[in-house]
Amino acid sequence: MPPSLHAGEPLVGDGGDGSSLSAARLGALSMQAAVAVLRARRPLPTLRDVSGLLPSLARALSRINLSSPAHEPLVRSLVTNPS
């Protein structure tokens, strides 16, 4: 499981100064956001919230365990069938 984001940690920096997330962490965060949307009771409002409030929701999203058996089918499907 990727490490959780810390409060105040920038999602994307200005490049080269170490303030941005690594590609691996950003990829994991994207997968966690996709799982959150797909598992939501109301996916469209959740997608809107995640896309509009990503910096605020990044820490909560980063806590989604992608290796959980409950999420395994979704993660496998997202990895094998990227849009």
Image (spheres, grey):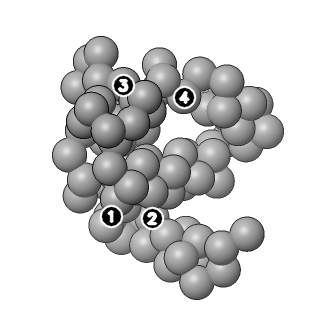
Q: Which residue is mark 1?
A: 68
Q: Earlier in the sequence, mark 1 or mark 4?
A: 4
Disc nearest the viewer among 1 and 3: 3
Q: Which residue is mark 3?
A: 10
Tell me the CA gap for discs 2 and 1.
5 Å
Real-space CA distance between mark 1 and mark 3, rounded to the nearest whole angstrom: 27 Å
Mark 4 or 2, nearer chain start: 4
User: What x and y, as percent, mark residue 8?
Assistant: 30, 15
Q: Pick whichever, 54 or 10, lies toward us.
A: 10
Q: Which mark is residue 57?
A: none
State the SS at label 3: loop
Q: On the rendered image, what quadrant is the C terminus found in?
A: bottom right
Which amino acid is tagged 1?
Ser
Which of disc 3 and disc 4 is earlier in sequence?
Answer: 3
Tell me the CA gap for discs 1 and 4.
22 Å
Image point 74% across, 30% down: which residue?
A: 48
**SS of the residue under disc 2:** loop
> Is disc 1 placed on a helix, strand or loop?
loop
Disc 1 or 3, which lies upstream in sequence?
A: 3
- Residue 10 in percent (x, y) is at 36, 25
Q: Give the residue at x 58% y 52%.
A: 34
Residue drawn at (49%, 70%) of the image: 75
The disc labelled 3 sits on which kind of residue?
Pro
Question: Can you identify the residue that label 4 sits on?
Answer: 54
Amino acid type at image mark 2? His
Residue 31 in view of the camera? yes
Pointer 4 local density, CA inside 10 Å: few below 14, some 14–19, many at least 20? some
The answer to whether the residues at label 3 and label 2 have Cβ atoms under 8 Å apart is no
Gap in Å between the C-alphas at discs 4 and 2? 20 Å
Cβ–Cβ under 8 Å for marks 2 and 1: yes
Residue 71, label in figure: 2
